[in-house]
Amino acid sequence: MTEKQINILQAALELFAEEGFKSTSTSKVAQKAGVSEGLIFRHFTNKEGLLEAILKEGEAKAKELFGDILAESDPKEVLRKTIEVGLKLKSSPDTYRFWKLQFKLKWELEYYAEHKMQDLREKLTDAFQYLRYKNPEMEANLLLVILDGMATRFLLQQSYDLQFMIDYLIQKYGL
Amino acid sequence: MTEKQINILQAALELFAEEGFKSTSTSKVAQKAGVSEGLIFRHFTNKEGLLEAILKEGEAKAKELFGDILAESDPKEVLRKTIEVGLKLKSSPDTYRFWKLQFKLKWELEYYAEHKMQDLREKLTDAFQYLRYKNPEMEANLLLVILDGMATRFLLQQSYDLQFMIDYLIQKYGL
DNA sequence: GATTTATAAGTAAGTAATCACTTATTATTA
DNA sequence: TAATAATAAGTGATTACTTACTTATAAATC
């Protein structure tokens, strides 16, 4: 990948995450990246191709985020790591941008990628089962709903005290 | 309000909720409403004015949604009604559209209207306090996070079994 | 190792279509 | 008949994308 290609991806990530995909023009991306507009189409075919390239690059981030949880064997640790997963949004500006983009796209393109959460859902169900919860499936679903709500809150309002809520949940779940 | 004015508002609500505010053109609204494009600007000044008119009309819906909870005195009923509030999204197609638009705007325009939830947050805090929860404020915040997550899920995936989760929560909270 | 050949990277200046919005004019109603 | 409602036909700006072309890098040939 050339330097200008990287510049385009970086500029597009920043703009898409801030202004939204549809609302960001290719000319603006080119301007921010310091390249001609045509180059975007040379490398990524069209605007959608540019988005896909960003999402593909970011999948490594997503797997890094959840891989650690799925590899964990101790059920209590599974729950603790899941609850704490939101903290990783803070790990780098680009990670934050990537997840902000993901959440924005969820609404902008209206898709709910249920299958992507399926592995985690099953892992959580197993953990709750092991810990003798009466309804492990529903507890797993509930925890995922809580995570989604917390992430939404934090991504839209950076001043939100994520750590505070996480600590409370860890205590509440007895971890 | 003339009939054509109503038609414009209705068409705009449907399109904004489905396609998003920025992504919906005024010409498309006019076409769907069966009026000339210029009429939109005569009645609502600009595209933003049209959005504001929709949101203003919808505020009655919002107050209807929460007013019943705020008027409740029994703390257990406060919690039960809060948890069940999501069911009202199903009450009419326009109510559903209005809330879908609200959630979309939250991401499209990036605002988190914390103050609008303040009354409910306090009501919930009082309810949890009365029920001797150790940390009523955090329990209120957690429940709001859960509500947001559930609403998100349902609005993006209409097949989601909202009733099932609501029943589970009511049982979990002992209501 | 110099020279030609081929490919990839990059740009400037277009394209038609669409955007939010305006103006001039006509129809409707009080 | 005066005001309001409504339309048709515009406006310049911006959209995603294309075209025609140049420059840089690498491969192949002499």
Image: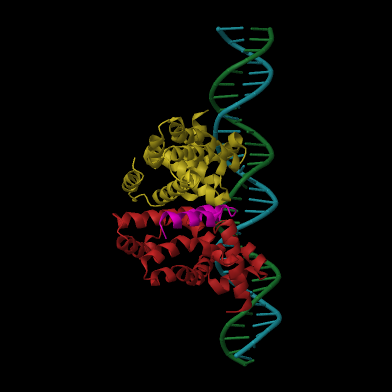
Chain colours: A yellow, B red, C cyan, D green
Q: Measuring 56% from the left and 47% from the top, which residue is drawn there?
A: A112
Q: Nearer the viewer, residue B101 or B29?
A: B101
Any part of residue A16 in sight: no
Residue A70, above or below A146? above
The part of the image, by quadrant, that contains residue B127 is: bottom left
Q: Measuring 39% from the left and 42% from the top, which residue is drawn there?
A: A83
Q: Position of residue B145 (x, y in %)?
A: 41, 54
Q: Where is residue B108 in the image (x, y as percent from the top left)?
A: 49, 55
Q: Position of residue B40 (x, y in %)?
A: 59, 70
Residue D17, above or below A67? below
Q: Measuring 48% from the left and 72% from the top, which residue is drawn there?
A: B60
Residue D12, above or below B35? above
* Helix, strand or loop for the magenta stretch, by majority: helix
Residue C7, above or below A19? above
Whether the magenta-drawn stretch holds residue B6 is answered as no
Q: Which of B106 and A167 is in front in this view?
A: A167
Q: Where is residue C2 in the image (x, y as percent from the top left)?
A: 58, 10
Whether the magenta-drawn stretch holds residue B154 is answered as yes
Any part of residue A99 in sight: yes
Q: Nearer the viewer, residue A92 or A11?
A: A92
Q: Give the range drawn in magenta.
A: B150-175
| B18 sits left or right of B109 in the view | right
| C5 sits left or right of B12 in the view | right
- The quadrant in which the C terminus of chain A is found is top left
All told, the count of numbered labels is 0
Q: Which of B36 and B51 is in front in this view?
A: B51
